[in-house]
Amino acid sequence: AKLGMPQFLSPEAQSLLRMLFKRNPANRL
């Protein structure tokens, strides 16, 4: 499942957001 990430975010920020999404699947919009 590919998440749509804003292009202005750095790869580090994107990977951090992915970890947060994986840890908190209920927080997905």
Image (spheres, rainbow, N blue to C red):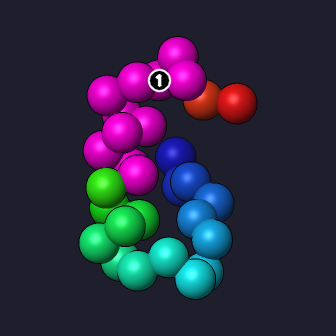
Q: What's the residue type where badge 1 is placed? A: Pro
Indicate the position of residue 15 as horizontal and vertical percent values.
32, 61
Q: Secondary structure at mark 1?
A: helix
Residue at 36% x, 39% y is 20
Q: Is residue 22 left or right of residue 2?
A: left
Task: Decide: is 13 above or below 19.
Answer: below
Q: Quadrant of residue 13?
A: bottom left
Q: Which residue is mark 1?
A: 25
Magenta region includes residue 19:
yes
User: Which residue is outermost to the right?
Assistant: 29
Mark 1 Cα-neighbour bin, 10 Å: few <14, some 14–19, many ≥20: few
- Magenta span of residues: 17-27
Residue at 43% x, 37% y is 21
Question: 16 or 1: which is nearer to us?
Answer: 16
Residue at 50% x, 76% y is 9
Q: Is residue 10 left or right of residue 1?
A: left
Main SS, magenta region, reads helix
Q: Is residue 23 left or right of residue 26?
A: left
